Image (cartoon, rainbow, N blue to C red):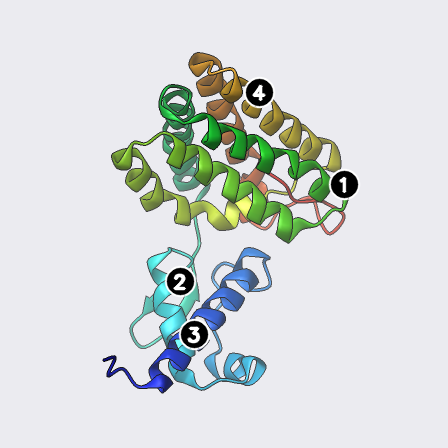
Amino acid sequence: MNDTPPSVIGRTALAVEVTDRLRQMILEGRLKPGEKIREKLLTEEFGVSRTPLREALKVLASEGLLELIPNRGAIISRQSDAEREEIFLVLSTLEGLAGELACEAATDEELQEIARLTDALRPQFEARDRRSYFSLNQAIHNAILNASHNETLIRSHALLAYRVQRARYQANPTAHLWERAVDEHEAIARTLLARDGARTRLLMTAHLRKLSSLTAEEEAGRGPGPGAIAGE
C-alpha cells in the first residue's frame, strides 16, 4: 500500500513544471546572466507559492544555470569565455568519442532511430521553430551518446553538458549558419549508418567546437541582435 499523500504528488509535479518554465526563461535569455531572481514576481507570474519555486531554484542551481548566494538569493550564472571554451573542448572530445564508439557498439535499430530524428531537423529549421529544434537537437546528441554504450562516457558528459545548455540554446548564427548545422547533423547521421567511426568522430568533434566561437559574443551580451536566429 502506498502511504504517500496525494498532495505530495501534486506538489512534485508542480515543482517540475515551475522548473521547466524557469529553465526556459533562462535559456531564452528572458533572465540575463547576473540578474537576481525576483521570487515574489515569479510566484505571481506562475500562480504558485514560494515552495515549488524554491525547489525549482535548487534544481537549476545543480544544473549550473543559477547560483544560490546566502543573504542575496538566486542569481543567474555568469560564464566567462575561457570557461565556456574549456567546457566545449571537453564536450567535443567526449561526443566525438561517443560517435566513434556508436559506430562499433550501436544496434542497427539505434542508428536508424538517430537517422530518423535527424530527418526531422530540417523541417524545424525551415519553420524557424527554435524551441522544438533545440529539443530535437538535444535528443539526437543524447541518442548518439547512449548508442556508444559507454556508461562512464555518458556520465562524464552529463556532468558538463548542463553548464553550457544556455550557450547551446542561445547560439545565434545567421540562417545560413543554422542551415549549415543541419547539414552537419545529416552528414553525421550518414557516417553513423555507414559505421565509419573515424569520420564520425571528426565530424562530431568539429560540430561541437564550432559552438564555442558562435556563443562567445552572445553569452557576453554582444550578440548579433534580434534579427539573428538560433541553432546548433
Which numbered mark, 3 or 2, is in the foreground of this view? Answer: 3
- Label disc, if present, on residue 13 of the rendered structure: 3
Mark-to-mark CA distance, 3 and 4: 39 Å
Mark-to-mark CA distance, 3 and 1: 34 Å
Mark-to-mark CA distance, 3 and 2: 16 Å
Quarter of the image holding residue 78? bottom left
Which numbered mark, 4 or 1, is in the foreground of this view? Answer: 4
Q: Residues within 10 Å of mark 4 (few under 14, many from 20)?
A: some
- Label disc, if present, on residue 126 of the rendered structure: 1
For the question of whether residue 67 can be seen, the reply is no
Q: Secondary structure at mark 1?
A: helix
- Is 149 placed above or below 60 here? above
Q: Secondary structure at mark 2?
A: helix
* Residue displayed at 29% across by 32% down: 150
* Residue displayed at 42% across by 66% down: 75
Which residue is the site of mark 2?
60
Depth order, front residue of 214/56: 56
N-term-proximal mark, 3 vs 2: 3
Which residue is the site of mark 4?
190
Question: Which residue type carries mark 3?
Answer: Ala
